[in-house]
Image (spheres, rainbow, N blue to C red):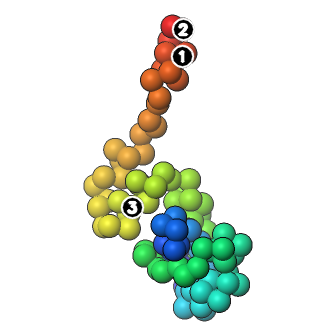
Amino acid sequence: MAWMYILECVDGSYYVGSTKDLKRRLSEHQAGKGANYTSRRLPVKLVYSEEYERVADAFYREKQVQGWRREKKEALINGSPELLPALAKKIFAKNEIKSKLGD
């Protein structure tokens, strides 16, 4: 079995990872041995996880979720999958739209 997981760091940021042993990996993160990102933002807490048959699937999902904006990650964490499609749409700044239109 393998896991994709999301941790909430003490500063409120999220860390997305994958592992074959979720319990061991969480212990490593809490001990400051998990990742450079989380070692500077302790303590961390597990806020979401998904279980997979294959490590490759968990790793693929990790990379997918890492690319998401905060709001989309929070919809997943909060159990609101119906919000994910709307949150997947790119948000353009007003100036960015004007420059694309040639104004």
Vertical relation: 89 (above or below) 55: above
What amino acid is labelled 1 in the image?
Lys
Residue 74: give its label: 3
Vertical relation: 29 (above or below) 74: below
Do the CB atoms of the residues marked 1 and 3 lie less than 8 Å apart?
no
- x and y percentages locating residue 8 in the rendered image: 49, 72
Q: Going 42% across and 76% down the picture, which residue do you hit? A: 47
What element does badge 1 sit on?
helix
Q: In the rendered image, which residue does mark 2 sit on?
A: 102
Disc 1/disc 2 C-alpha distance (Å):
5 Å
Q: Is residue 88 visible?
A: yes
Q: Is residue 15 left or right of residue 33?
A: left
Q: Earlier in the sequence, mark 1 or mark 3?
A: 3
What amino acid is labelled 3 in the image?
Glu
Q: In the rendered image, which residue does mark 1 sit on?
A: 100
Q: Going 56% across and 53% down the picture, which residue do you hit? A: 67
Q: Going 54% across and 91% down the picture, which residue do you hit? A: 23
What amino acid is labelled 2 in the image?
Gly
What element does badge 2 sit on?
loop
Disc 2/disc 3 C-alpha distance (Å):
35 Å
- x and y percentages locating residue 25 in the rendered image: 61, 86
> Would you call the spot at circle 1 few (<14 residues within 10 Å), some (14-19), or many (20 or more)?
few
Disc 1/disc 3 C-alpha distance (Å):
30 Å
> Would you call the spot at circle 3 few (<14 residues within 10 Å), some (14-19), or many (20 or more)?
some
What element does badge 3 sit on?
helix
Residue occupying the far top of the picture: 103
Do the CB atoms of the residues marked 1 and 2 lie less than 8 Å apart?
yes
Vertical relation: 58 (above or below) 64: below
